[in-house]
Amino acid sequence: MEILLHGTIWEDSTEQIADILISIRRFDNLPSQGLQLWNDRLVLLCAPQLVHGQSAIRAPEDVLKSNWIAVHGRQEFWQGMADALGIDASANDKRLSTNSTDIALEMAASGAGCIVTTQSLARTYVDRGLLVEPFQTRAKSAWNYYLAEGQASKGTTVAKVRDWIVAEAQTVIG
């Protein structure tokens, strides 16, 4: 059996060459015939050194003094987390932005500020101890991962891989 992983970023291809498509989508832009893989949550993260010392993040208001790292197209994450924390997002004027969640996570891990992202993307950084959650506040995410079959999908192999992905997806958010 051969499995080809074909990744695209910021591309909406009209030609569907893949048998299985996994995409992150906002609730108001769902893929046709897509199956939501899990209910993601938003998490606030920072480098471990930002929760220690004299200028540590100890209360939600402390987040307002930090650099906020945002990802283009996901700026709404910060407003959702600010609402969940009960702070005024407009009170923060220190913002960094990038077009990539990976870059934003690396910036946060290096101590450049705080990031709000989905729990599924943050998990690896938290598990490795590169980022921590200063508060256990998790906000609902408007963005989730969806699985859809390509237009040319057929055969039992594709069905088996799809079923395996769906089963594994149930372990992503615990």
Image (cartoon, rainbow, N blue to C red):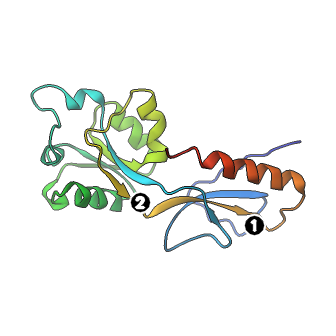
Say few, some or many: other residues with alpha carbon within 10 Å of mark 1 (under 14 / 14 to 19 / 20 or more): few
Task: Give the percent coordinates (x, y) of residue 9.
Answer: 58, 54
Q: Write down the residue under mark 2.
A: 141
The image shows residue 109, relative to residue 148, as above or below, that is above
The image shows residue 124, relative to residue 104, as above or below, that is above
Q: What residue is shown at x 28% (from left), y 32% (from top)?
A: 111
Badge 1 or badge 2: first in the primary sequence: 1
Q: Viewer-proximal residue, 123 or 55?
A: 123
Q: What residue is shown at x 14% (from left), y 25% (from top)?
A: 53
Number of the label disc, if any, that sits on residue 114:
none
Lateral position of residue 72 relative to residue 89, left or right: right
Mark 1: amino acid: Glu
Mark 2: amino acid: Ser
Q: Are marks 1 and 2 in contact (CB under 8 Å)?
A: no
Q: Quadrant of residue 90?
A: bottom left
Q: What residue is shown at x 87% (from left), y 51% (from top)?
A: 157
Task: Give the percent coordinates (x, y) of residue 20.
Answer: 74, 57
Lateral position of residue 2 relative to residue 57, left or right: right
Q: Quadrant of the N terminus?
A: top right
Q: Write down the residue under mark 1.
A: 15
Say few, some or many: other residues with alpha carbon within 10 Å of mark 2 (under 14 / 14 to 19 / 20 or more): many
State how far apart marks 1 and 2 are (Cα). Answer: 29 Å
Instruction: Classify mark 1: helix, strand or loop.
Output: loop
Lateral position of residue 7 relative to residue 151, left or right: left
Lateral position of residue 121 relative to residue 152, left or right: left
